[in-house]
Amino acid sequence: MAFKITHNRDACIGCGACAAVCPDNWKMSDDGKSDPVKTELEEIGCNKEAADSCPVQCIKIEEIK
Ligand code: SF4
């Protein structure tokens, strides 16, 4: 199983929750918004928690082949 992460950066309010719960794949950028380190992953890992913790639900995870 592989996963693709989509981050709606326009909607991101820069709260930092994703980077707090999933620092392995989410970093805060200089403009105050977050960015994923990788957008295609073999293991979803803490990205699920990152998506669940986002108050504006701008992190989407989909399964890809
Ligand atoms: S949790 Fe959502 S709103 Fe907060 S920094 Fe991450 S992507 Fe942006």
Image (cartoon, rainbow, N blue to C red):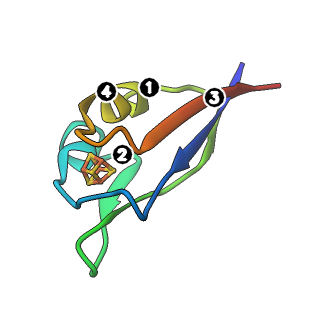
Q: Earlier in the sequence, mark 4 or mark 3?
A: 4
Image coordinates of residue 10 in percent, x first then y, are 42, 64
Q: CA distance from mark 1 to mark 3?
A: 13 Å
Write down the quadrant of residue 34 in the picture: bottom left
Q: Element under label 1?
A: loop
The tag on residue 45 is: 1
Q: CA distance from mark 4 to mark 2?
A: 16 Å
Residue 56 lies left or right of residue 61; in this view the side is left
Write down the quadrant of residue 32 in the picture: bottom left
Q: Earlier in the sequence, mark 2 or mark 3?
A: 2
Q: Relative to 47, is 23 above or below?
A: below
Q: CA distance from mark 1 to mark 2?
A: 9 Å
Label 1 or label 3, whichever lies nearer to me, is: 3
Q: CA distance from mark 1 to mark 4?
A: 12 Å
Q: Which residue is mark 2?
A: 24
Q: Identify the residue shown where x is 19% and y is 44%.
A: 17
Q: Relative to 6, is 11 above or below?
A: below
Q: CA distance from mark 4 to mark 3?
A: 14 Å
On whether ligand 1 comes within 8 Å of the CB at mark 3, the answer is no
Residue 30 lies left or right of residue 64; in this view the side is left
**Looking at the image, which is closer to me, 47 or 43?**
47
Q: Answer whether labels 1 and 4 touch (C-beta < 8 Å).
A: no
Q: Answer whether labels 1 and 2 touch (C-beta < 8 Å).
A: yes
Three-letter amino acid code at disc 4?
Answer: Asp
The tag on residue 52 is: 4
Three-letter amino acid code at disc 1?
Answer: Gly
The tag on residue 62 is: 3
Q: Give the farthest residue toward the top.
A: 1
